[in-house]
Image (cartoon, rainbow, N blue to C red):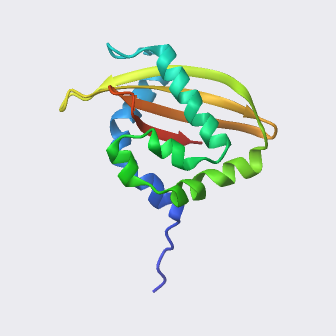
Amino acid sequence: MERKRIKKRDIIFAKFAKVLAVLALAACLAGCGQTGLPEGFDEEKIRESAMESIGYFNNRDYKSIIAMGSEELKKSITEEQFAEAGDPFLDTRGEFQKIVKEVFAGNTDSKTGAAYGGVVMVGEYEEGKIQFTIAFDERMELVQFLIK
């Protein structure tokens, strides 16, 4: 009987599943054209914080991305796990050029009342693109940083 090998990358993304459930809906809404941030969120603050985290990502400074995070995010991933997920993207895409697209969206968890605001940004690199899905809680602590 052969056991299926689980990739570390799959484990990393599975750890984010609980945090991301609420934000997946927000991303869906953004894709459906129902954009908008919950009350109390500022598009410019989200843009600035998202760009800060992307800057850390481009410099492979995963520790600083984690430091921007909520306590739950900080407990769910290590620098090494972040590097295992992020380095392959940076190794194949080359130097960051610019952000070519951004869509803001948000959601409020109906069970907890917690509000989340985020942005999907597409970064252009020398050898391709990387899509970032980045979200923050009401304290502007990072709760999601996905790369695709």
37 w.r.t. 110: above or below: above
104 w.r.t. 97: above or below: above
Task: Kindly identify the residue that appears in the image at 38 percent across and 46 percent down.
Answer: 73
Residue 124 appears in view: yes
Task: Kindly identify the residue that appears in the image at 54 percent across and 22 percent down.
Answer: 48
In the displayed structure image, the side of residue 45 where residue 114 appears, left or right: left
Q: Position of residue 142 (x, y in %)?
A: 42, 36
Residue 32 appears in view: no
Task: Kindly identify the residue that appears in the image at 33 percent across and 46 percent down.
Answer: 72
6 w.r.t. 31: above or below: below
Quarter in which the N terminus is drawn: bottom left
Q: Residue at the far bottom: name it.
A: 1
Label tally: 0
Q: Residue at the far left: name it.
A: 111
Task: Kindly identify the residue that appears in the image at 44 percent across and 21 percent down.
Answer: 105
76, 100: nearer the viewer: 76
78, 89: nearer the viewer: 78
Quarter in which the C terminus is drawn: top right
86 w.r.t. 134: above or below: below
In the displayed structure image, the side of residue 41 where residue 104 appears, left or right: right
Q: Position of residue 15 (x, y in %)?
A: 39, 54
50, 147: nearer the viewer: 50
Q: Position of residue 61 (x, y in %)?
A: 60, 47
